[in-house]
Amino acid sequence: EAQTTDVIIIGGGGAGLAAAVSAHENGAQVILVEKMPRLGGNTIISGAAYNAADPDRQQSIEMTDLEKETVEAIIAEVQDDELVKEWQATLAEEWEAYQASGETYLFDSPSLHKLQTYNGGDKQADPVLVDQFGDQAYEAIEWLEGHGMEFNDHMFTVLGGLWSRAHKPAKPLGTGYVDTLTEYFEEHSDEMQYFLNTEATDLIIEDDKVVGVVVSSNGEDVELRANNAVIVAAGGFGANVEMREEFNEHWPSLKDIKTTNQTGATGDGIRLGQQASANLVGMEHIQLLPMGDPETGSLSGNIEQGVQDRIFVNSEGKRFVNEGERRDVMTEALFDQEDAMMWTIVDQHSYPTGDTKNNFNETIDELIEAGRAYKGDTLEELAEQIGVDPENLVATVEEFNQAVEGEIEDPFGRTLFDNKLDTAPFYAAARKPTVHHTMGGLQINKAAQVLNEAGEPIEGLFAAGEVTGGIHGSNRLGGNALADIMVYGRIAGANAANAGSGE
Ligand code: ADP
């Protein structure tokens, strides 16, 4: 027998949970299905950085001359799209006002965020989606805070994030997002339910309208019917090796590359959308990170605390890339190194004490104990431990420190600096390329409606999160996924709650 509710959500990661809460806030009863034994998806195991221009928190960061040059280059860049040109015009005005103010803190604004997002994805994204993303990123932080979530005051530049606009939750990894939204669920359990170990296998489509979902639970098929709409929030396909092979165009074969993803990131949402003739966009854009654990591919054991305070060296102890670059650029450079392996090097600035934690809730002492990170009281000692030439490592760090001081231009064009690497103890950890995120997916419009090949909304079907395409272009900036899934999760939830009513 079929169970009926207002809005059905497929997937219990960040996008699905945000959509569920938002749908309920807009008056809908909700059922969410999650195929894994727990909620959270890739969201809960992520570094959890959330990008948004922040009118308060960024005031404690000083702006450098190189960052000023970056803003000016972005204002001057030739653009074709009319909406993108509008962002530039807005940015130019904001930048002028900032300069006139005599302030010295880090400049930021939604316009700069949009432009960096769009340029950083090779202008392949849909500007209309990026526009709304940039406008609502900060508002969604306030919404989460309104539901009790806490963020640290300290903001940072996350790997491939290009700017210090990443918020870090007070709770470890992505648990802050998932716990906050799950608590809402539990407080409204009379009108909201979630089912674990419950996999959506088919959409129910009647007269070209999506009216429900077939789910499989304990080997049994059950029909769920939606009065209003279905939201697909089933995440990406980073853990699906066949799909990676099917769509990858950019990278060498990804068959043997490990992934940061949880095992449920198999692209089911893409296949479900296709049952309703959804159009797919950007499927060939697969994101790798240069930051995988060499054994497992996971982000665990990553010792960087932020982009400014670490360098990458290869097995010769030499730098090989601008470590403040886009994720695709850094990973491409890593593939060219011996064994596609590198060492992240940090110093005491990143770990004032042995029990300081990384972004994955691990202390540096714990990682050293487990043989996953190394510590030296001098750079030579560190080099001995990791088997790289000590003279090379010392020379590499000396040159980097000169670039930090502004005495030389960085040989790799790096623009993001803070402290020199000059304070013992020094630390190192090995990293390899790993599959992290899939930029492509179901095409949506501003309302988060899924579009068919003719560009028309499919009745009764919405989508949000990594399952969608078009927001990140060819390369997603670090810290933009959490903002994306919260912004579009909220929009999908609200519009699904209001869909089909009174018709
Ligand atoms: P996002 O960041 O877009 O929310 P996540 O990876 O965090 O993506 O969450 C997606 C969730 O969807 C995961 O928990 C995943 O297990 C779940 N999921 C994937 N396919 C299905 C399916 N067929 N039925 C139910 N849940 C699914």
Image (cartoon, rainbow, N blue to C red):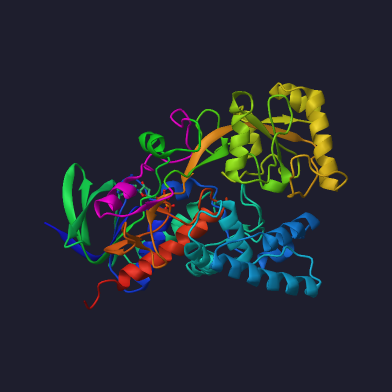
Q: Among all residues in the image, which is located at the extreme right?
A: 407
- Write the start and end of the magenta stretch as one range: 253-282
The answer to which quarter of the image holds residue 318 is top right
Where does the image place residue 144, in percent across and percent down from the top left? 49, 65
In the rendered image, which quarter contains the C terminus? Answer: bottom left
Where does the image place residue 82, in percent across and percent down from the top left? 55, 68
What residue is rendered at 78% in x and 29% in y?
393
Where does the image place residue 66, in percent across and percent down from the top left? 77, 54
Where does the image place residue 137, in percent across and percent down from the top left? 53, 65
Q: Is residue 378 above or below residue 407?
A: above
In the rendered image, which quarter contains the N terminus? Answer: bottom left
What residue is rendered at 74% in x and 27% in y?
317
Whether residue 310 sits left or right of residue 204 in the image: it is right
Q: Is residue 263 magenta?
A: yes
Q: Nearer the viewer, residue 327 or 208?
A: 208
Q: Is residue 206 visible?
A: yes
Q: Among all residues in the image, which is located at the extreme bottom?
A: 502
Q: Among all residues in the image, which is located at the extreme left?
A: 1
Whether residue 266 sits left or right of residue 438 in the image: it is left
Q: Is residue 95 above or below residue 242?
A: below
Q: Is residue 452 above or below residue 289?
A: below
What residue is rendered at 68% in x and 63% in y?
75
Q: Nearer the viewer, residue 330 or 40?
A: 330
Whether residue 240 sits left or right of residue 437 in the image: it is left
Q: Is residue 148 visible?
A: no
